[in-house]
Image (spheres, grey):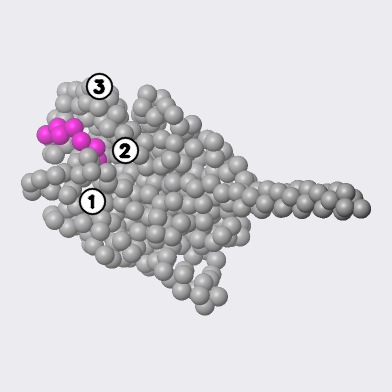
Amino acid sequence: MKSQTVKVMIIFLIFITVFLFNSFNLKAQEVKQDTLTFAFWNMENLFDTIDDPGKNDIEFTPVGRKKWTEKRLQHKLKNMSKVIKMMGKNGGPDLLGMSEVEHQSLINELIKNYIKNKNYGVAYKESPDKRGIDNGLIYNKDIFKLLSVEGLHVELPTHYPTRDILKVILKTNNNDTLYVFVNHWSSRRGGRERSEKNRLQTAATLEKNIDEINSRKQNPNILIIGDFNDTPTNKSFIDVLKTKPVTNFLMKIKKHVAQINNLYNLAYESAVKGRGTMKYRKVWYMLDQIIVSTAMLKEKGFTYLLGSYKIFKPNFIIIKAGRYKGSPFRTYGGDKYLGGYSDHFPVLAKFVLNY
């Protein structure tokens, strides 16, 4: 009798063990996640050494004012790759938007020669910019599949040729669609107020395209990155794109009135605290930003990790002393070759991808 009771108990324990194992295994599958890093960096005049007909790029040639040689180009590519590989796990971020790149061949070379341990794809379009600089995107092919690449033309009030907004549509391996917009808006040359109309027009072009996406897709995943040459509190963001601080989303969640199709600027809080990615006349400006749609703040698909937005500035890309102490260590100071990195610090944020 005792023997039979023991057998029953053993069978029962085996059953419970198998049941619990399967339950835990199923739960682990249900909460499978991947933490991704999305970043942006103004590459500061990443030119090849060839003079392109019809483009104002002669200064970045061996005979130009900058004395831009193949040796200096390779040094810059190596420098930039060193920083990029530190941005995310396994040797780089999962998405990196870039501005001030002359040709896709330069990004191809950067990946092939200096970032070999990450399976990157490239999305790129040539644009009508007079200097020949464009926006590009590299993406982790182990996570994303490229669906389409488009250059959104911006017709400025001055009709001066400018950079296209790079629109890239990606699909994740959990079947989520991500709309990425890489921006490099018109500079503040001539003063912020005088040049503001150009950035307002670029913001309006971006807004129109986002509205079109919202009209045909419910609560889409939208990621807007770039060097905007405006800060999060300027009219282009507040009045045109109507971006909001992430704290605004959190307050609405508490009140159970979170709205869809809003845009949230991850850089807002840092900007109002006086932080920035670029320093001009002793003042920091948060020109490089990451903006997301409501969908990317919720607990489905992509979810922004609160507080993970940051200006990425490892110690070696910061000037240590002198008049420009604390500023980004750039490639040139005027026409003087410094051998640094960029005049902007990169920015990044982390997201959880739920499967």
Pick the residue in front: 195 or 170.
170
Of all residues shown, which one is farthest toward the left?
Answer: 322
Q: Residue furthest bottom?
A: 255
Q: Name the magenta segment's main secondary structure.
A: loop
| Image coords of residue 201 (percent x, y) | 36, 57
From the viewer's perspective, tell me whether residue 310 is left or right of residue 258: left
* Res 140 visible: yes
Location of mark 2 (residue)? 83
Mark earlier in primary sequence (3, 1):
3
Q: Earlier in the sequence, mark 2 or mark 3?
A: 3
Considering only vertical position in the picture, is 144 above or below 115? below
Judging depth in this view, the residue of 327 and 224 nearest the camera is 327
| Residue 175 x, y percent position in the rendering | 63, 46
The residue indicated by pointer 1 is 278
Q: Nearer the viewer, residue 324 or 158?
A: 324
Number of other residues with Cα within 10 Å of mark 2, as a class: few under 14, some 14 to 19, many 20 or more: some
Say what amino acid the circle numbered 3 marks: Glu
Q: Which residue is mark 3?
A: 70
Q: Nearer the viewer, residue 20 or 339?
A: 20
What amino acid does circle 2 point to? Answer: Val
Q: Are marks 3 and 1 in contact (CB under 8 Å)?
A: no
The Cα–Cα distance between marks 2 and 3, rounded to whole angstroms, is: 20 Å
Query: Contact (CB < 8 A) between labels 2 and 3?
Result: no
- In the rendering, at what x and y percent does residue 46 appear? 29, 34
Where residue 317 appears, as percent x and y from the top left, is 23, 41
The answer to which of marks 2 and 1 sits earlier in the sequence is 2
Q: Is residue 42 magenta?
A: no
Q: Residue at x 23, y 43 (%)?
A: 315
Magenta region, residue range: 336-343
Residue at 41% from the left image edge and 69% from the top image edge: 247
